[in-house]
Image (cartoon, coloured by chain):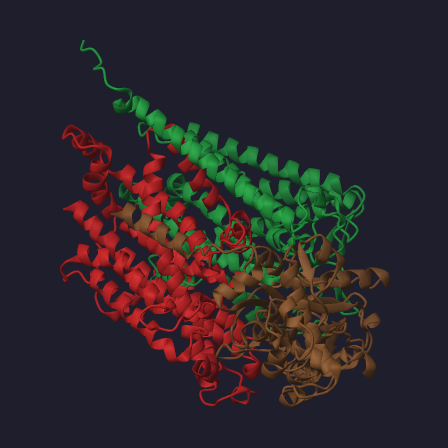
Amino acid sequence: MKLRTLVLGLLAAAAMAVPASANTLDNVRKNGFLRCGVSEGQPGFSNPDAKGNWTGLDVDYCRAVAAAIFNDPNKVRFVPVSFAERFTALQAGQFDILSHNTTWTMDRDVGQGLEFIGVDFYDGQGFMVRKSSGITSALQLKGATLCTQTGTTSELNAADYSRAHNLGYKVIVYQKASEYIAAYDAGRCDGATTDRSGLAGDRLKLKNPADHILLPETISKEPLGPAVRQGDQQWGDLCRWVLFAMVNAEELNVNSKNVDQMMNSTSPEVRRLLGKEGGFGQELTLTADWAYRIIKRVGNYGEVYERAVGTGTPLKLPRGLNNLWNKGGIMYAPPIR
Amino acid sequence: MAERPRRAVWRDTHWRSIFAQALVLVALAGVAAWLVHNAADALTRRHVASGFGFLEHTAGFSISQTLIDYSEEMSYGRTLWVGLLNTLLVSAVSIVLSTILGFIVGIGRLSSNWLVAKLCTIYIETLRNIPLLLQILFWYFGVLQTLPVPRQSMTLGSWLVLNNRGVYVPEVVFGHGSWIVIATFLFGLAASFGLYRWAQHTQQRTGKRPVVGWAMPLLIIGLPVVATFALGHPFSLSWPELSGFQYQGGLSINPELAGMTTGLSIYTAAYIAEIVRAGLLSVARGQREAAEALGLPRQRVLWLVLIPQAMRVIIPPLASEYLSLTKNSSLAIAIGYPDLVSVFAGTVLNQTGQAIEILSITMAIYLALSLITSGLMNLYSYAHRLEGSA
Amino acid sequence: MTAFRAPPKHHEGPVEWVRVHLFDGVFNSILTLAMIALVVWAVPPAAKWLFIDAAWHGAARDACEGVSGACWPYIGARLGQIVYGFYDAGERWRADVVFAFGAIGLAWLVIPRLPRKGWVGGMMLTLYPLVAFVLLSGGWFGLPIVSTERWGGLLLTLVVAAVGIVASLPLGVILALGRRSELPVVRVLCVAFIEVWRGVPMITVLFAASSLLPLFLPDGWEFDKLLRALISIAFFNAAYMAEVVRAGLQALPKGQYEGAAALGLGYWQAMIFIVLPQALRTMLPGIVNNMVSMFKDTSLVTIIGFFDLMGTIQAGATDLEWASPNVAVTGYIFAALIYWAFCFSMSRYSAHLEEQLAEGERR
């Protein structure tokens, strides 16, 4: 009786283990949805609301990939994963793309089995302190206690900066964003440190956001971007060009509102982007209108940026470095041709 | 004598059992080989580094509490030791505190005082039935935000400073010649113990107890005090002082350690209390009645008759409770206390990505702690078994 | 010599009760006064914080702004999330049905007068999990699929606990029997399995299940993350369950084994018809106690990124719409209350079983 229950249970478990091929795209097509590893809640990048609807830049990127493949931006399953766990989870195949504002570093790219497909947000590490402390520069934080979260480059950068300027920081490392920000808010630390975009979002979670300021120093380069598993070139290319298409669309002034008119554009660049010329979609094993789908269903990079973190949102992050290369930023995508 | 009936090999239970076991072993080896093959395959295909070489690499991150010398330039291997020692520290402190609290509550639950017994019951039934993680988070985040900032610390002179960065007390600095004072203290302790044994022995032999109580404080306190003066105050105190953002100097207990020990001790004490109660109840009724009939006061009955006999029943489950406390200390990761799991299976794992190696090392350490404890426990049970019960 | 004393007078009434139970001697009197002081010091402020100073109405963070007590509107606003997680709002009736059937089944098993306990128990262990799984995950009978990432809150806590309990019991029995087996290989394997799982913290096991296990499977095989966590929790608890079962087996008089052998019953027959039914009765309190620990341990899945009851509450502490001072502590207290209600009723039930057993022995 007991034995039979066990055997039945094991059989059921085995049946649920879906065997699939090594090809990620085939796998995604067969599942009928894309699985996207995101943060457990970071405003502006990947944040669930009370109903479990995800919003943010990282989330919209995954929707764009889903739109390119399925013509439906909702065919995404968001898998929340902690900072600490995200790389092993990606290697282990828990999702198809990691879109978790991950800093592109050499070790992660070369030694940890990740393949970064581009940068969707140029960032740098900063500090947040209480206004009442009167501190205006990170160099005044000598001997300070800082709160941050584990699994990020922030831990290492803070240690580097402290060593370089002989500041003797004491860094307390928490497992989750909600914990490090709660500890900072409770006064455990003199400052909080992580990527500036992260601080801007996390500041909103404080009891009184107006009482806190970001210090001017940016102590590191944090090119944030999505990553996929190493060893599947086709999938990596597809994800890379979804991002490039979004940036190129902004550069060509193609957005979700005018994309239908743009289908009749005479500009060769726009025609190539929207699949009127050349067989770029087919080369990605997608349809010719792959980029049209992305722009129509999700939007170009600028639209996504403004919607997620732009000046109209609570985060109020100006474009800065993330503006297009011809508008004073460094956001630059190779041409589609 | 009947001859062993001849059977076909496959019907002979002896051969059948050997065959079954061989089959199990082969199947197991097969599964293991398959798993290892898969993992090796996955790692090479995705170019993930493997092996234990990473232990030599520079760590590059700082740790908020270190019991041994540590700096960012040191290796990942060193962080393993830092983390392990932090785990042992929080476990040891919590074991002591939870034992004291657990005994008080356990004895209190059997108290004839109605109010004490009821409050102890409420304590046990509340804290045992709420997840430890929740309790630790409550103590850490709930209490932390009620504490003042360093500049407005609650202070007891300079003797005790309490703020949201921790608890600060003066630290004793051992100067030149301080070991002599410590030696005289230890000598006083040993001499008092000898005196006590002699007094007891004499009482048992003659029925009269020599009065030695006055000598003990003289030996234990008097001797070291004399030595201190003779050597010209070899000790000094380092006082906590506000400098910059926080208090410097003195002995500090940071809120993470305080939160962990509070949570762990209060939670485990509820279990220990139940063990103590069961132990006391296991002592035969007649023992208490006989002791009371002899006219021993209630406190003496408890300490001289009941507890010594209950210890045999108390110690084995107590040891396994200590073990689960040590394992539970891994919840430190939730509140940023740098224990083994948080430092090694957390930060180091993230920086290197070598999950298999790091999780194996971590699990092996806990397993070793557990096996050592249960080994010691078996020795104890063997040495203290009741005659006749084998 | 003890002086001759008069026999104690027999008194009754509340004053006498207070004297005997609270002020019996100097030590006890001091103790009583200290305890009264403790209660006076702790209870009124706590009650004030929980009820009097608390906010009771409002819809967003300003409802609790400047309030020095608990923030109950937050619990009201997030109750759906606390109970169901992100489970699609239109489909929550499915979770309700599962809750209802589970409650009825359990009540049936616990209330002594109701008949056919074995039959109902069998159903709860076999049919019920199947029905619950189909209902919750969907995909059959036209029910829309709700992927496990969206399960959360109390629902997820109960799913994890129930699966752990149902799966760990048979596994534990098998392990315990294996530990007492006469075949050395089986014995050694079972001992190793039990000791390894009991020797490591559950967090490391969950880490391994969530990030390591998939590495050991061939590429493309893929387990649902929740399923992996469930398997590891079941194994983890099976090891603890095995020790409870072993204790139960050891407590059974030797004559029962010998009697079964004398009747010519084989090993499995003896175990299933003679040994286990008797041993299970004595094991029941231990098993229920084990369930309590396991129910509490489910909160650890928060650490590997599940939004169970604990995780939902914790995430709520930094909820953008509700980030006001006492939201976090209110959440912790509310969660503690739920966990406590479940665990306390289980441990009361276990104590009740123990009393029943003790009565049976006294006879």
Question: Which of the 4 image quarters holds residue B12?
Answer: top left
Whether residue C285 sits left or right of residue C43 in the image: it is: left
The percent coordinates of residue A104 (x first, y second) are 73, 63
Q: What residue is at 37 percent from the left and 39 percent from the top?
A: B309
Q: State the quadrant of the N terminus of chain B.
A: top left
Using the image, determine if residue B314 lies above or below residue A85.
above
Which residue is nearer to you in this view: C258 or B313? C258
Q: Which chain is green?
A: B
Closer to us: C149 or A337 = A337
**Residue at position x 74%, y 85% from top?**
A267
- Of all residues shown, which one is farthest toward the right? A165
Q: How many marks?
A: 0
Q: Colour of chain C?
A: red
Q: Is residue A93 visible?
A: yes
Location of residue C311 in the rendering, given as x and y in whole percent from the top left corner: 50, 68
Residue C204 visible here: no
State which quarter of the image contains the C terminus of chain B.
Answer: top left
Residue A246 on image: x %, y % = 68, 77
How far across and how far down the image is residue C162, in percent?
Answer: 35, 60
Question: Which residue is drawn at the image coordinates 22% and 49% (left, top)?
Answer: C358
Question: Left of A8 or right of it: where is C84?
Answer: right
Chain colored brown: A
In this orientation, which residue lies closer to the viewer: C351 or A124?
A124
Picture layout, residue C215 above or below residue C191:
below
Q: Nearer the viewer, residue A25 or C353?
A: A25
